[in-house]
Image (tube, grey):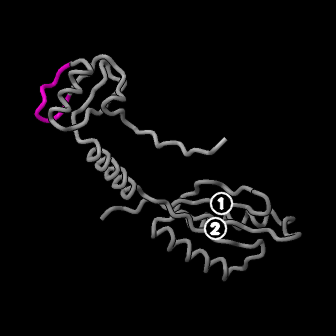
Amino acid sequence: MAFRPREKEELHRVNEKIRVPKVRLVGENIEVGVYSLNEALDIARKVGLDLVEISPNADPPVCKVIDYSKFKYEQKKKQKELKSKAHKVVVKEIRFSPNTDDHDFNFKLKHAINFFKEGAKVKAYVHFVGRSIVYKERGELLLLKFAQNLEEHAKVEEMPKLEGKRMILIMTPKLLPKK
């Protein structure tokens, strides 16, 4: 059996692919009303455009007389615009060991504050290597101290929990007051 790629299925039914007896017709320079499918197709052909099923679940389905290729282009353009406006959440990671000393801790704390000012989430974790897993309490205390020191900049989204050899804490920035 030969492999045949599937044809990309259209989102809207067009012209002869519409399979309902009556449609509500809309469009520019067209009298809005309920027409039989053949009448609607004739109207679309006379104008030199396509009959596109816009709302198939309506009773009767709504069809619009438009240039289908132009319609598809505009739909893609709208999708692209929505995607570009969507806010992308950045997650920055900060790694500790169970024996992290105060200087390193403060250094990483400053990095976290900068990440929150940029609007990024922070995933802080303690990585247990070898037998250091016996110091789980140290790791948890370290992460709680980290969260406590960042109270004014961020809020805890997920309390420290152990996943394999890592104890993870996730924090999100508090909303900055608008000026």
Image quadrant where one finds the N terminus: top right
Image quadrant where one finds the C terminus: bottom left
Hey, what amino acid is under mark 2?
Phe
Q: Is residue 105 left or right of residue 62?
A: right
- Label 1 Cα crowd, 10 Å radius (few <14 / some 14-19 / many 20+): many
**Mark 1 element type:** strand
- Whether pointer 2 and pointer 1 mark residues with C-beta atoms closer than 8 Å, the reply is yes
Is residue 151 visible in the rendered image? The answer is no
Q: Residue at x 61, y 59 (%)?
A: 170
Q: Is residue 59 left or right of residue 3?
A: left
**Mark 2 element type:** helix
Q: Nearer the viewer, mark 2 or mark 1?
A: 1
Q: Quadrant of residue 109?
A: bottom right
Q: Find residue 160 and report its horizontal and vertical position in percent.
A: 69, 57
Hey, what amino acid is under mark 1?
Leu
Q: Which residues are the magenta region? A: 26-34
Q: Is residue 128 left or right of residue 62?
A: right
The tag earlier along the polypeptide, 2 or 1, is: 2
- Label 2 Cα crowd, 10 Å radius (few <14 / some 14-19 / many 20+): some
Q: How many marks?
A: 2
Q: Is residue 98 left or right of residue 63?
A: right
Where is mark 1, residue-wise? Answer: 169
Q: Find residue 75 and report its horizontal and vertical position in percent.
A: 32, 46
- Relative vertical location of residue 116 with respect to residue 80 in this rendering, above or below: below
Give yes or no for residue 137 being in the magenta stretch: no
In this view, the residue in front, 116 or 14, is: 14
Q: Residue at x 36, y 52 (%)?
A: 82
- Badge number at residue 146: 2
- Relative vertical location of residue 21 with respect to residue 31 in this rendering, above or below: above
Residue at the bottom extreme, as displayed: 103
- Relative vertical location of residue 62 with respect to residue 73 in this rendering, above or below: above
In this view, the residue in front, 108 or 56, is: 56
